[in-house]
Image (spheres, rainbow, N blue to C red):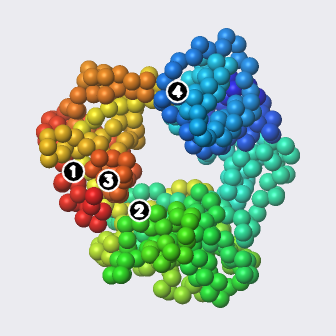
Amino acid sequence: MLLSRLAEVSREVAATAARSRKTELLAELFREAEPDDVPVVIPYLAGRLPQGRIGVGWKVLGHPVPPAREPALTVREVDARLTALAGVSGPGSQAERSRLVGELMGAATEGEQRFLLGLLTGEVRQGALDAVAVEGLARATGAGSGDVRRAVMLAGSLRAVAEALLADGPAALERFRLTVGRPVQPMLAHSASSVAEAVEKLGACAVEEKLDGIRVQVHRDGDTVRVHTRTLDDITDRLPEVRAAALGLAGERFILDGEVISFGADGRPRSFQETAGRVGSRTDVARVAGEVPVSPVFFDALSVDGTDLLDLPFAARHAELARLVPEPMRVRRTLVAGPPDAGAAEAFLADALARGHEGVVVKALDAPYSAGRRGASWLKVKPVHTLDLVVLAAEWGHGRRTGRLSNLHLGARTADGGFAMLGKTFKGLTDALLAWQTDRLAALTVEEHPWGVTVRPELVVEIAYDGLQRSTRYPAGVTLRFARVIRYREDKTAEQADTVETLLAAHPEVGA
């Protein structure tokens, strides 16, 4: 498949808001694709590189190259070139990367260059999410969309299912079954503004503590234990205490869903960053396990003793979990009969927050496990923090945001009268707000760059965020977690924006 065709579909998908049209565009693309194209086409549609980070930034990309007149690059050729690019290292690597990028861009047409630039900078945001791709794949092959969705969740890979479907048709879906040892995509939760709202929507439900840890899926088959992350990475070797805990359970064959979290000497959870740092550590595991031990806390069972539990109601799955896992290793919870008992759910939330957790997850007792989906039967509730920050710079968008200033650099006031950058966000921006902020920031621009603009620190924006974590990348030593735009505050001056000191005081558990 020519890259130009993929870039064309990406642009068309970005230009339409209609899900049905997005689905048809992707269906047409999949009908044209060969099975060997799929390992490249699927991640490219989602704005990802199969190679991951390849060490190419604006220093390399900021030098325009005359485009080719006619399209000739195939997606597999581009993938091969980027694989070579990812392998560059050692002395002279910067110059070699520049040469390889120049050759690639020189072989691309103008439209292909725009697509590649977005891909390399992580700014392909055309709305071709996996859920839409699943529907397009189903339509292209004549398979049922529900069957494709289930196969993807059981395979843990849209790419693997797409390759099989395009090669062998709908019958290939029979290969994808729940198997101990093969991770599946986890069920996710939507957000609710309050516990009362969540209970009103779900009726009879369980209210569970929301731990600020790392999601894990633990598979045991006899003496073999594998631990996988939310993104299905195998981290077994990093978590010997989780393996030991799994081997200590009575069952011989199971798949459990939960989190790992680190607790301090006082029994309160350590910061997310400490837990994440521990889980991310690949070297001297015995030493770091002694310094920052983690504990598994389970909240669901997907398979026990060879029985697939996915389609059972949550109440039945939890009964199996309770039979297998002792209470200290299960998440704390309370059962609520419905809206009249919302007060008990509110009290449980208050207690969870007092215990140092980030909120609760409210789960319908009658719901199956919707692996790989953000199901409406799980609703998370946690406090939302807000700040009034100053826009320091903005980056040009890509895909549907091409020509708009999108990714905002956010700053808080410092004691010396300056501003300290706390992070970036492009979340929460509507098309109308993108257009408005592009015009507004253009008037405040003091310096232009290939990636965007630096602006006078005058525009105040209200930001919601989930928490704070330490970071050496930013001058205040901290950065915002999951920041998103609420609204612009033109009624406020930069001198009325929040300070770094105020932010740190609100999060004593993190500090600088």
Which residue is disc 2 drawn over? Answer: 273
Mark 4 → mark 3, Cα distance in angstroms: 29 Å
Q: Do the residues under discs 2 and 3 have CB atoms within 8 angstroms?
A: no
Answer yes or no: is residue 118 visible.
yes
Task: Name the residue type under label 4.
Answer: Leu
Residue drawn at 72 percent across, 23 percent down: 73
Which label sits on residue 61? 4
Which residue is disc 1 drawn over? Answer: 500
Which residue is disc 3 drawn over? Answer: 478
Would you place residue 469 above or below residue 270 in this image?
above
Mark 4 → mark 2, Cα distance in angstroms: 32 Å
Of the image marks 1 and 3, the number of the one nearer the N terminus: 3
**Which corner quadrant holds the C terminus?**
bottom left
Residue drawn at 72 percent across, 57 percent down: 155
Residue drawn at 36 percent across, 81 percent down: 265
Of the image marks 4 and 3, the number of the one nearer the N terminus: 4
Q: What element carries label 4?
A: helix
Of the image marks 4 and 2, the number of the one nearer the N terminus: 4
Answer yes or no: is residue 361 visible.
no
Q: In this view, does 177 lie to the left or right of 264?
A: right
